[in-house]
Image: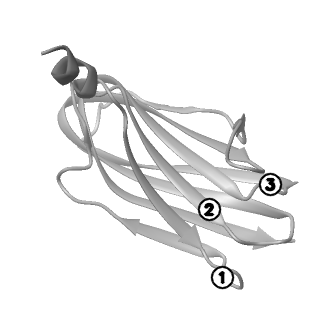
Amino acid sequence: MCLFLFTGIQAQSKTGTIKTGNSYLDLNFNASDTVAAGQTSYDVIIFSAQHYPTTQDLLVKLDSISTPGATVALTGSKFGTTYAAIDSTVTWSGTTADTTIIISNTTLNRYRYYKVTVTRTAGKARINDVQLKQYFE
């Protein structure tokens, strides 16, 4: 019983890779990619095999399921261990049926790991799309 309760509050996650020479990743999501009452967050970890400093644009599409509220944060790491905030966390109050959140970072960094964290603050929200674009400047 305790194991069931423990796994019920674990965060979900999905991973993707931007290969060397590419600068864009678009991840597919389905109905199981919902941040529901039993989950506090959903992490998307993106590894980038680039060897150059970049700026980034992040697009996250969320769909309302039941009076949702959520925050979206973009963080980065050089080695995939400790993550630092790349830009401000965006809050969605769930007042619309769905929303598109865009985070644009215009400061060059050398991160190879990016983490997008969608944290549920109320109700349920489904993640429909996550896109990360890097710019070599």
Q: Is residue 95 left or right of residue 91?
A: left
Q: CA distance from mark 3 to mark 1?
A: 19 Å
From the image, state whether disc 1 or disc 2 is nearer to you. Answer: 2
Q: Kindly state the secondary structure of the residue where label 2 is placed.
A: strand
The reply, left or right, for residue 43 in relation to residue 124 is right
Category of crowding for the residue at label 2, using alpha-carbon neighbours closer than 10 angstroms: few (below 14), some (14–19), many (at least 20): many
Q: Are marks 3 and 2 in contact (CB under 8 Å)?
A: no
* Disc 3 target residue: 106
Rendered location of residue 108, percent (x, y): 86, 56
- Quadrant the N terminus occupies: top left
Residues at marks 3 and 2, CA–CA distance in whole angstroms:
19 Å
Of residues 110 and 5, the one nearer the viewer is 5
The amino acid type of the residue labelled 1 equals Asn
The residue where tag 1 is placed is: 22
- Furthest residue in direction top, as rendered: 2
Q: Sequence-wise, which precedes: disc 3 or disc 1?
A: 1
Disc 1 crowd rating (10 Å Cα; few below 14, some 14-19, many 20+) is few
Percent across and percent down for residue 86 are: 72, 42
Find residue 8 and report its image quarter.
top left
Q: Quadrant of the C terminus?
A: bottom right
Q: Residue 47, which numbered label?
A: 2
